[in-house]
Amino acid sequence: MAYRFGHLALFVSNLRAAEAFYLQAFGMEVLFREAVADDGNWYTLRPGQSWGDAEQAGAEIGMVALQRDELNLPIFRGEPRSGTVLEIGITVPADEIDAISADRPESATRLPHEHGDLFFKDPYGYTWHITNAAQPFESNGARDGQWLDL
């Protein structure tokens, strides 16, 4: 199985406007929207809930995941910096994740993470997220059972 591009996460200054732009520009669909709760964890709006529902409940959406075909584009509320991205994600066969971890250069700093994914920061400041190609791109809320109760 070949490696393929998993996702590209970007900071955007206006999350709602960026969602509208990417939906129109690339014909993408919204996969899910998430907010960080007071406990510091990400929670996912349930399917069918909207920006308006979140706003009425006082939840501030901090991330929207968009998709078209095999391209996943999570966008985060924040200030973009020219030439930078939040995270570069690639998917590989499950049995290669440990090999990549073992073979990564010493200058790459492994970052803690759950769910069997590999995160590391390269010496240039980019964070790489290596995931199992057989796993779907899903929200934290769906994976962990943490839903925003609006």
Image: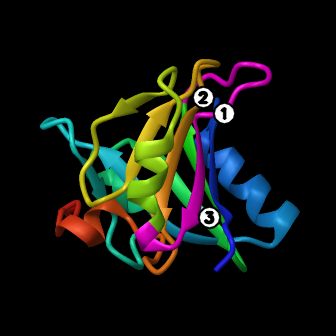
**Stretch of the chain drawn in magenta:** 78-95
Q: Residue 11: which quarter of the image?
A: top right
| Mark whose residue sits in front, 2 or 3 | 2
Find out whether the residues at labels 1 and 3 contact each other: C-beta distance under 8 Å: no
Q: Residues within 10 Å of mark 2 (few under 14, many from 20)?
A: some
> What is the quadrant of residue 82 in the picture?
top right
Q: Nearer the viewer, residue 84 or 2?
A: 2
What is the spatial separation of the Cα atoms under label 2 and label 3, in whole angstroms? Answer: 21 Å
Q: Is 60 on the left or on the right of 71, as rendered?
A: left
Which mark identifies residue 66?
A: 3
Tell me which numbered mark, 1 or 3, is placed earlier along the sequence: 3
Residue identified by numbered label 2: 126
Name which residue type carries label 2.
Tyr
Q: Residue at x 72, y 57 (%)?
A: 20
| 6 left or right of 127 in image | right
**At which x and y percent is residue 62?**
44, 42
Q: Is residue 37 visible?
A: yes
Amino acid type for the residue under numbered disc 1:
Val
Dot 3: element: strand
Q: Are marks 1 and 2 in contact (CB under 8 Å)?
A: yes
| Tag count | 3
Circle 1 sits on which residue?
Answer: 85
Which residue appears farthest toward the right when viewing the image?
25
Q: Which numbered mark, 1 or 2, is in the foreground of this view?
A: 2
